[in-house]
């Protein structure tokens, strides 16, 4: 039990909380279909997934669990047709977050917030292909709407949304982490589960 | 052979299950042994000590020595132990790892690196031994609890261990599947395996076991041969919190029920999926009835309960209560079901809140009535605790409390006593009787013969979605119930 | 006698594809669709493949719905080109049809894979590829838990309705966040508990042991896999030719 390597129990936990994360994410992610609502999703998803994620962190004591979660989500997004961009961002976010949690020895709440923020930033990748996709789509729109419209669309949609996303997610993931911790204290710890 | 020498164990975490103290026990090979005792007596802990989950998975403080075939088990890993000892657990829903039945049976073999052809052979043999050829290659989520439990037994048996450990395997099963389980254990016995069963339902094991260990507060109090145990007085058993070791016999009861009908169903029909449906042209339930809803798994008992509560969509037919028709939506407001898995209906952070959530009243009045209810249910001491931190019986009581607080007229209970010992079962039964006296109509889905005998005054038997018969404890009906519970 | 006792895995419905082929082709499909640029014939083929496979697996309903959607999208696009929709509808329609052209083939192929493949076939495929256990075990747990979450969610929803916790009820307006708490917390409690018990049951059956795992099912390549391989080659070439 003391070993550094992940054992079967740890791996099962990764699976369970990845499933929970995905289900909660998708419950919110119905908004996913409409790209203009991405900012809203940046706001909502990290808040709600905060509960399963904070619960997950109570089970994490070793390096690797959060990274594996990132890899699974990455493969999942790739296979969902979101191309390699979210796959890359999720793997990177998972690894970085895991490193940060480890710096906090998997106990520090400050590190948990920052790590969770970075982990949540992985979702920015999901929107990225949409922008690229709209870029090819722009060609068509150009014929119909004219250059001016396209220029405006391109100007607003892609460039600042990614950066603004990081900011929005910082706020929402902090809220999510706080909510998660509140729920842990209010329910899970008292029920003897966490 | 298994030997426990001066073993004591205490859990580190705030585990609900109790620790055990000064256990000395020798179990020779080929013996079938039953561990019994009231809830929290430590029988589950003994099973965990033998299969190694305590302390490897459930950390705790272990003293003393545990020998399995002469080797000290503290030197063995869970993986090594898993090849000698097979474990079946209480909850059929939580112990399968795969999604289809054949993979689940193979799961243990896959982990221990058994060759594919050998795996095919073992699955074939196990399926024949346990009479479950028809359960192969099925979706596990579509199987009933009893079928899942048999898959769990098969999965363990395919690993061909010498020792089998079963922790309350019958808690979620009905009579017919208990008979199947019994058959499985009999197979193991004839194969000369050692079988250790922690159980609160005793009667079905009486002609299989060789020896009974009775525990109290983490200690072994009696070590009996099966003959001695069989001769024990029923009253003595009940005092110890044990269920009867003999089949329950039902007697004709002459309760006077109101002539008038409280509930009347007409042309009730509902279907979902291909094979599951409910079809009840006509049914009446008298005032003040505590209705025992009987039938095998899949007979539509839970569906009927859901329909009565207004939880299903697309139900045809009508339901009159006290002469007025009640639509699904209206029924949702006047009925309340305590589900089999109470975990699903406990929402708040304390027992008191849980009761308050159900109430229509507000402020001081609500608080007063809530405290009254808690007092009646013996829950006052627990009122600040989180409902999920309670034991099964206590959770059950909280759920019943919230049903009372909701002040609904129709109350439904789905297996309220599964996994409860005799004393807790009596408590539940007293509560149900009180609700009946207060003029509520109570439906009780149960496989628990003792509970049925204690509190029901009306019976209803479903078979494949149809009403087979219903009525009070008349001579005819009593005979039917006796036959139902003695059939194997 | 012994021979009769042998268990044999059941035959597959419709065309048998090796799970490895399915997974690889999913990657190919996801990649091609990304590279694809305004090529209706090629796009149609990419749409047709999942439809045919769905039909062969007797998944008629999704196949027809999906086929219908695709035709509708093609028609709408054609109509737009000839007559021209006004500003906003054109924009929305464009996005929707883009969704159908680019994302649906992968969704549908994914749907086909999930419906036609057992989780342990994936596992055996991954094991053949020497993917480490620390990835395989969590993935199989995800497969196992998604249906569980659905089941639990339904029961909890029922319990909430019975207690009158829902949007618009008097209790709800007093504290709207409650609804979230009551929905999510019992679900997670329940799943966390099932997970703990599952771990115990899995460990007591030797999961995570030092020995190399074996697998009940053995995936094997067949003629259909060869067909898919040829098709993949053609599609890749075609796409590349377009790009140059």
Image (cartoon, coloured by chain):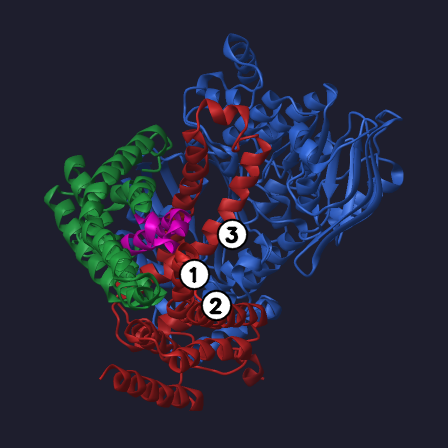
Residue depth check, mark 1 versus mark 3: number of the one nearer the observer: 1
What residue does disc 2 label? C76
Can you see residue B219?
Answer: no
The residue positioned 40% from the left and 54% from the top of the image is: C88
Tell which of C242 and B332 is nearer to you: C242
Q: Is residue A24 magenta?
A: yes
Which lettered chain is shown in red? C
From the top left corner, tell me how far across and down residue B477 is, in percent. 84, 41
The subunit carrying tag 2 is C
Q: Is mark 2 on a helix, strand or loop?
A: helix
Which of disc 1 and disc 2 is earlier in sequence? 2
Q: In the picture shown, does residue A137 fall above or below B220?
A: below
From the top left corner, tell me how far across and down residue B131 is, in percent. 61, 67
The span from disc 2 to disc 3 (Cα, nearest Å) is 52 Å
Q: Is mark 1 on a helix, strand or loop?
A: helix
What hue represents chain B? blue
The subunit carrying tag 1 is C
Residue C93 bears which disc, if any? 1
Count all numbered tags in the image, as a single digit: 3
């Amino acid at each position: 039990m003391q070993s550094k390597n992940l054992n079967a129990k740890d791996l099962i936990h990764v699976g369970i909380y990845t499933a929970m994360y995905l289900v909660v994410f998708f419950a919110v992610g119905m908004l996913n279909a409409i790209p203009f609502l991405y900012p809203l999703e940046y706001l909502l998803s990290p808040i709600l997934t905060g509960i399963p994620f904070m619960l997950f962190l109570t089970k994490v004591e070793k390096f690797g669990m959060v990274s594996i979660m990132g890899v699974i989500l990455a493969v999942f997004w790739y296979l969902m047709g979101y191309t390699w961009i979210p796959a890359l961002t999720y793997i990177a976010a998972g690894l970085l977050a895991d490193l940060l949690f480890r710096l906090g020895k998997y106990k520090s709440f400050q590190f948990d917030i920052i790590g969770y923020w970075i982990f949540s930033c992985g979702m920015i990748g999901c929107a990225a292909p949409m922008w690229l996709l709209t870029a090819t789509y722009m060609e068509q729109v150009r014929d119909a709407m004219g250059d001016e419209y396209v220029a405006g669309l391109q100007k607003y949609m892609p460039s600042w949304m990614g950066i603004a996303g990081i900011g929005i997610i910082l706020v929402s993931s902090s809220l999510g982490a706080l909510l998660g911790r509140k729920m842990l204290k209010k329910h899970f710890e008292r029920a003897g589960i966490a | 052979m298994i030997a426990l020498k001066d073993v004591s164990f205490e859990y580190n975490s705030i585990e609900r299950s109790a620790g055990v103290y000064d256990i000395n026990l020798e179990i020779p090979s080929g013996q079938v042994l039953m561990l019994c005792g009231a809830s929290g007596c430590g029988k589950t802990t003994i099973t965990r000590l033998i299969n190694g989950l305590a302390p490897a998975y459930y950390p705790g403080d272990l003293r003393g020595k545990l020998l399995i075939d002469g080797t000290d088990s503290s030197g063995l890993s869970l993986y090594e132990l898993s090849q000698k000892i097979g474990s079946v657990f209480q909850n059929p829903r939580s112990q399968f790892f795969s999604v289809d039945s054949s993979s689940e049976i193979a799961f243990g073999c896959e982990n221990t690196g058994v060759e594919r052809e050998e795996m095919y052979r073992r699955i074939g043999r196990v399926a024949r031994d346990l009479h479950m050829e028809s359960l192969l290659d099925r979706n596990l989520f579509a199987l009933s609890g009893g079928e899942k439990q048999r898959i769990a037994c098969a999965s363990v048996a395919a690993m061909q261990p010498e020792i089998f450990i079963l922790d309350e395997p019958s808690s979620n099963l009905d009579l017919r599947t208990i008979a199947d389980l019994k058959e499985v254990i009999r197979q193991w016995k004839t194969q000369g395996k050692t079988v250790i069963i922690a159980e609160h339902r005793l009667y079905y094991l009486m002609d299989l076991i060789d020896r009974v260990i009775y525990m109290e507060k983490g200690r072994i109090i009696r070590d009996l041969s099966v003959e001695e145990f069989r001769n024990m007085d029923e009253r003595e058993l009940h005092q110890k919190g044990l269920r009867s070791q003999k089949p329950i016999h039902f007697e004709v009861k002459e309760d006077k029920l109101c002539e008038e009908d409280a509930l009347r169903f007409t042309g009730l029909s509902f279907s979902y999926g291909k094979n599951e449906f409910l079809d009840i042209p006509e049914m009446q339930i008298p005032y003040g009835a505590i209705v025992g809803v009987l039938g095998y798994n899949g007979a539509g008992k839970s569906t009927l309960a859901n329909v009565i509560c207004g939880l299903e969509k697309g139900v045809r037919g009508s339901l009159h209560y006290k002469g007025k028709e009640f639509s699904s939506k209206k029924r949702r407001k006047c009925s309340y079901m305590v589900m089999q898995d109470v975990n699903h209906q406990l929402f708040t952070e304390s027992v008191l809140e849980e009761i308050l959530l159900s109430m229509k009243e507000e402020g001081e009045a609500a608080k007063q009535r809530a405290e009254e209810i808690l007092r009646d249910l013996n829950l006052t001491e627990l009122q600040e605790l989180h409902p999920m931190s309670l034991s099964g019986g206590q959770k059950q009581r909280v759920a019943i409390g919230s049903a009372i607080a909701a002040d609904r007229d129709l109350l439904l209970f789905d297996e309220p006593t599964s996994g409860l010992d005799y004393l807790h079962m009596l408590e539940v039964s007293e509560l149900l009787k009180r609700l009946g006296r207060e003029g509520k109509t109570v439906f009780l889905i149960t496989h628990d013969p003792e509970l049925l005998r204690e509190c029901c005054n009306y019976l209803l038997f479903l078979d494949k979605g149809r009403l087979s018969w219903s009525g009070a404890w008349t001579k005819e009906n009593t005979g039917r119930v006796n036959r139902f519970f003695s059939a194997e | 006698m012994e021979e009769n006792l042998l268990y044999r895995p059941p035959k597959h419905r419709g065309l048998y594809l090796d799970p490895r082929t399915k997974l690889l082709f999913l990657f190919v499909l996801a990649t091609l669709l990304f590279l694809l640029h305004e090529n209706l014939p090629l796009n149609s083929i990419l749409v047709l493949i999942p439809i045919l496979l769905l039909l062969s697996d007797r998944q008629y309903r999704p196949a027809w719905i999906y086929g219908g959607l695709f035709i509708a999208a093609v028609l709408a696009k054609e109509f737009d080109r000839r007559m021209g929709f006004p500003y906003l509808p054109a924009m929305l329609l464009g996005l929707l049809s883009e969704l159908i052209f680019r994302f649906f083939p992968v969704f549908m192929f994914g749907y086909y894979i999930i419906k036609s493949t057992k989780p342990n076939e994936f596992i055996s495929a991954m094991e053949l590829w020497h993917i480490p256990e620390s990835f395989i075990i969590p993935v199989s747990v995800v497969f196992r838990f998604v249906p569980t979450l659905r089941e639990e969610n339904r029961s909890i929803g029922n319990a909430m309705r019975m207690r009158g916790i829902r949007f618009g009820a008097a209790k709800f307006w007093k504290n709207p966040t409650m609804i979230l708490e009551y929905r999510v917390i019992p679900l997670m409690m329940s799943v966390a508990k099932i997970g703990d018990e599952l771990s115990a049951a899995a460990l007591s059956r030797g999961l995570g042991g030092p020995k190399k795992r074996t697998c009940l099912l053995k995936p094997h390549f067949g003629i259909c896999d060869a067909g898919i391989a040829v098709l993949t080659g053609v599609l890749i070439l075609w796409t590349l030719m377009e790009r140059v």
